[in-house]
Amino acid sequence: MDAGQRFGDELRRLRHAADFSLSDLAGRVHYSKSHLSKVENGDKAPSEALARQCDAVLQAGGSLLRLARPRPAEPEPASAQPRPVPAPAQRGAMHTRAESARMPVERWTLTLTGADGRLAVGPDGTPGELEVNRWALPGSHRVEPLPEGTVETFGIMLGDLRQLGQCQPPAVVLPGVLVHAATLRSLADRVTPAERPAVLVMASRFAEYAGWCLQEAGDEHGALTWTARAARLALAAGDGPFAAYTDVRRALVALYRHDAAQTIALARRGARAADHRIRGLAEQREAQGHALGGDEDACRRALDLAAEHLSRAAAPDGTPVVGTSTLADPVAMVRGWCLYDLGRPAAAAETLERELGKVPPGALRTRVRFGARLSLAYADADEVEQACATAEPLLEPAVHVDSCTVRADLDRLSRALRRRHQQAAVRELLPRLHAVLHTSSIS
């Protein structure tokens, strides 16, 4: 018996147990009676959206969602190592070009070398002529104290890059993030032992943000590689809590793979951190994993723990804040996200709309991400005109921020709206939405 037939048989069994007719269930999940009949008979494969709503209506505890969801690919190990770096003549290069009417074109190559991400710079396509970690004279192993405020200046630059990442695509932000991460890693080898931990801590923050940018750009391997590098840097600095936070980041990759079990397992590892903010963020991620698996009770417990830990978190100490800095109440927003995954779109829409109103206007990426999820919730709650009205102002900024994770929700929205193609608002929105899904801000 194939997966579609197993789902159909279980759906029919649960529907009969609840004493629902096909018409009763169709009215509650906003799918046609004929569509449900085809699903029950194994003639049509169930979508995740349908499975999620049937799960909630029939109180199936996630069993239908698990039957509908394909088995996820094996996740990359948490200790993922970067791919071996080819010889200099074979390496890909990241070029910057300075052109002037009075000067010939000059080309410089920045090359990340070695497993630890050191940076080499050379002119005219010759990597390695100047290595940042060899600023001292040849043969010299002299170390000197850093000028006062050096590490703090890097922290300010990271804050600026994160702010830029709210309104620009990863292709704009990532080169600077990678360069600063590599520079700090190289710098750590030439400072005094007392200063080295602070430099490595800052390097780990840049490396973690590089992983986030790469995930937003759709490069899962790169995201996991740089997240693993951030963990190594944090451990080398003696920053165990931030090393634990990288498991929370890996859990986000698993979440977008729709792998509930791996999301929960990685989040629980992160929750071991001796830091209330990181534990709160880990509990939030675990809640999302439980919601993905259809376990509402476990999701609610994790969200309550997240709220408790975040309320006890220490005030920022001048270093870049760990996790989101654009949400007034991260737990409330994540609660809305979870309600959608639990098959309660109307409740999700109410929560997401309330919290979205608190997001600063300049935080475009955050507004687009949660706005897309809000529009999706409206669509699944059969508030189709509201879904279209919510999505319309997101289209232009969605192209601009060019987020792979946002595009995933917009694609789900497109599929949800296509089932209501006879409505005028949908017919007007769908061509523009389709164009957004096939447009990249920067090639």
Image (cartoon, rainbow, N blue to C red):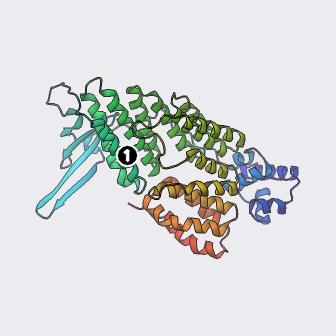
- In the rendered image, residue 332, in percent from the top left (x then y), is placed at 60, 47
Toward the top, the furthest residue is: 193
Q: Nearer the viewer, residue 232 or 194?
A: 194
In the displayed structure image, the side of residue 8 where residue 301 appears, left or right: left
Of 197 and 292, nearer the camera is 197
| Quadrant where the C terminus is found in the figure | bottom left
From this view, report whether residue 365 is shown above or below residue 34: above
Q: Is residue 27 left or right of residue 127?
A: right
Residue at the left extreme, as displayed: 102
Find disc 1 in the rendering and name its residue. Answer: 159
Task: Give x and y (percent) for residue 129.
Answer: 18, 40
Image point (29%, 27%), residue name: 195
Q: Residues within 10 Å of mark 1 (few under 14, many from 20)?
A: some
Asked if residue 394 is positioned above or below residue 227 in the image, the reply reads: below
Q: Amino acid at mark 1?
A: Gly
Any part of residue 260 in sight: no
Q: Is residue 400 visible?
A: yes
Count all numbered tags in the image, as a single digit: 1
Mark 1: secondary structure: helix
User: Which sits in the foreground, 150 or 33?
Assistant: 150
Q: Position of residue 89 (x, y in %)?
A: 25, 44
- Looking at the picture, tell me which residue is in the foreground, 73 or 247: 247
Residue 286: x %, y % from top left: 61, 39
Q: Residue at x 62, y 36 (%)?
A: 305
Name the image quarter holding residue 347.
Answer: bottom right
Q: Is residue 168 left or right of residue 136?
A: right
